[in-house]
């Protein structure tokens, strides 16, 4: 059977990184098996669902490199792909269950429900204990009440037995018989509930696998009951481990950026985010940690999921970003980093060759574009650094001598940069003629030319620093 895997977000907000991870797994598995990856929009919560979130989600998925084969944006043989456009299908099938005696009309009012919940709590029973009041009402009588316009919902008649299934992440899972009661499948406003729509769609859209977050594990019991009522075969389920923050709590806004678009705005590489997310709950058969999605598609399988909660660590993500950034070609690196610098940054007025050499050197020092401007200060800043380290170097007599000598040399240079050769000559002069050695020489040179006490390799930095910057630093 061809694999059919769906990602079924509710468009009630921006695409969350947890959602992106689920989508990624679904996409990888469908591709690995040569199957279809389907996007289904679960928008039955009419108040909270917004079309603009759907549009934004599709855009964010695309940025992640996740493209669906079927969905509201693509069409397909199993549409419509928005649940709000499928209400007739759900209503008809809910009615079918009523006719077959597998579901029933329930007329409990909100007030009554509240009282029954209180009563159940007092008796230390689950709130659903009393939900079955209309379970055995004569169907003809129930129908009469419905026809006279009495407010009602449709409840599923829970067979009251144990349900067991084999989860691809968690192994065998058994739900006790009293875990849920007779649950609502169609609300009083005629809108079906998530568990019902989900089953109808996964069944009618011929899904072979449902990969989703662990928080849906407990929904599976209701869903299994519904499959059984229709005589339909459930898909294979894989409930992926929870993403947690450092405090081991479920990842939420409190933990920082949690929507994909925030990472896009902070100029993270999508391939780095996908690589990192992929490893939060799944592992590579050869324990590799840096890879592209294309590289792992052929080997992605469902046997390597990890059931313990996965710690989402932004510092690790930055490391992945750095690794992927350093894999970029010179051209791609330019296209990636240059636009992240402010429009009036002096970087932009340098030659293409200079820019390439510069990025080639600084890519080793940074993991994210946000770190680049600080590093480029060594090439452009004319504000001398202050602090103890600088004061110490300044306190050496030799530093004043180096500064004096360099000043004289630099004032005679009219090319745009000091070459590496010239720099070597300066160093040799200081060594031989001024008799300055070791840290006095190197730290003194650095301070004279860059205004800093510490920093990257001077041999690379000097030929990249515009002469007018050096002149300004030397007070020329
Ligand atoms: N609409 C549900 C959600 O966004 C999907 C659950 C499922 O995949 O079954 O969490």
Image (cartoon, grey):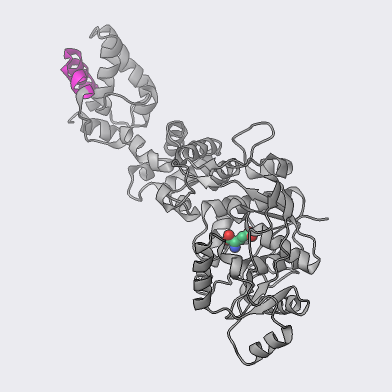
The image quadrant of residue 139 is bottom right
Q: Is residue 60 visible?
A: yes
Q: Residue at x 48, y 54 (%)?
A: 259
Residue at image position (58%, 57%) is 62
Q: Which residues are magenta?
A: 389-409
* Image spot of residue 106 (x, y percent): 63, 78
Quarter placement of the N terminus: bottom right
Up the image or down, 55 lies above or below 355; here it is below
On the question of residue 64 being in view, the answer is no
Residue 385, how many percent across, how many down?
22, 30
Image location of residue 416, percent across then percent down = 33, 33
Q: Quadrant of the C terminus?
A: top left
User: Residue 239: x, y in percent?
Assistant: 64, 50
Q: Ligand 1 quadrant?
A: bottom right
Q: Looking at this view, is 195 or 453 the one in front?
A: 195
Taking the magenta stretch, the answer to whether it contains residue 313 is no
Residue furthest to the bottom in view is 148
């Amino acid at each position: 059977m061809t694999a059919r895997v769906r990602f079924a977000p509710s468009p009630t907000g921006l695409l969350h990184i947890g959602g992106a991870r689920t989508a990624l797994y679904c996409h990888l598995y469908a591709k690995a098996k040569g199957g279809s990856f389907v996007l289904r929009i679960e928008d039955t919560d009419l108040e909270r669902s917004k079309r603009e979130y759907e549009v934004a989600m599709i855009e964010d998925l695309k940025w992640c490199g996740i493209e669906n084969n079927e969905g509201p944006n693509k069409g397909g043989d199993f549409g419509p792909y928005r649940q709000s456009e499928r209400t007739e299908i759900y209503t008809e099938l809910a009615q079918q269950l009523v006719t077959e005696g597998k579901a029933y009309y329930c007329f409990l009012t909100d007030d009554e429900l509240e009282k029954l919940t209180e009563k159940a709590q007092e008796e230390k029973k689950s709130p659903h204990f009393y939900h079955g009041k209309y379970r055995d009402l004569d169907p003809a009588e129930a129908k009469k009440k419905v026809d006279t316009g009495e407010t009602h919902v449709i409840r599923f008649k829970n067979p009251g037995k144990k349900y067991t299934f084999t989860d691809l992440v968690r192994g065998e899972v058994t739900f006790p018989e009293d875990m849920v009661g007779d649950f609502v499948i169609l609300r009083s406003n005629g809108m079906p509930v998530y568990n019902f729509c989900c089953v109808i769609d996964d069944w009618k859209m011929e899904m072979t696998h449902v990969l989703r977050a662990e928080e849906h594990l407990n929904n599976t019991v209701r869903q299994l009951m519904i499959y059984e009522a229709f005589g339909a075969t459930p898909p294979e389920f894989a409930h992926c481990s929870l993403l947690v923050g450092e405090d081991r709590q479920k990842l939420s806004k409190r933990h920082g950026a949690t929507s994909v678009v925030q990472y896009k705005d902070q100029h993270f590489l999508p391939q780095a985010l996908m690589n990192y997310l992929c490893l939060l709950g799944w592992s590579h058969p050869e324990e590799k940690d840096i890879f592209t999605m294309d590289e792992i598609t052929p080997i992605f399988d469902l046997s390597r999921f990890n059931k313990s909660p996965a710690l989402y660590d932004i510092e690790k993500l930055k490391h992945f970003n750095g690794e992927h950034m350093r894999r970029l070609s010179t051209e791609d690196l330019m296209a990636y980093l240059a636009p992240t610098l402010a429009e009036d940054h002096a970087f932009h007025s340098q030659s293409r060759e200079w820019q390439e050499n510069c990025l080639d050197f600084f890519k080793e020092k940074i993991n994210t574009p946000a770190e680049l401007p600080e590093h480029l200060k060594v090439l452009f800043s004319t504000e001398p650094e202050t602090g103890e380290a600088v004061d110490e170097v300044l306190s050496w007599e030799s530093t004043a001598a180096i500064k004096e000598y360099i000043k004289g040399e630099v004032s005679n240079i009219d090319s745009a940069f000091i070459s590496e050769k010239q720099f070597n000559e300066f160093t040799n002069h200081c060594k031989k003629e001024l008799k300055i050695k070791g840290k006095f020489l190197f730290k003194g040179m650095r301070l004279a030319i860059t205004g800093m006490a510490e920093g990257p390799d001077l041999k690379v930095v000097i030929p990249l620093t515009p002469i007018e910057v050096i002149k300004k630093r030397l007070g020329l």
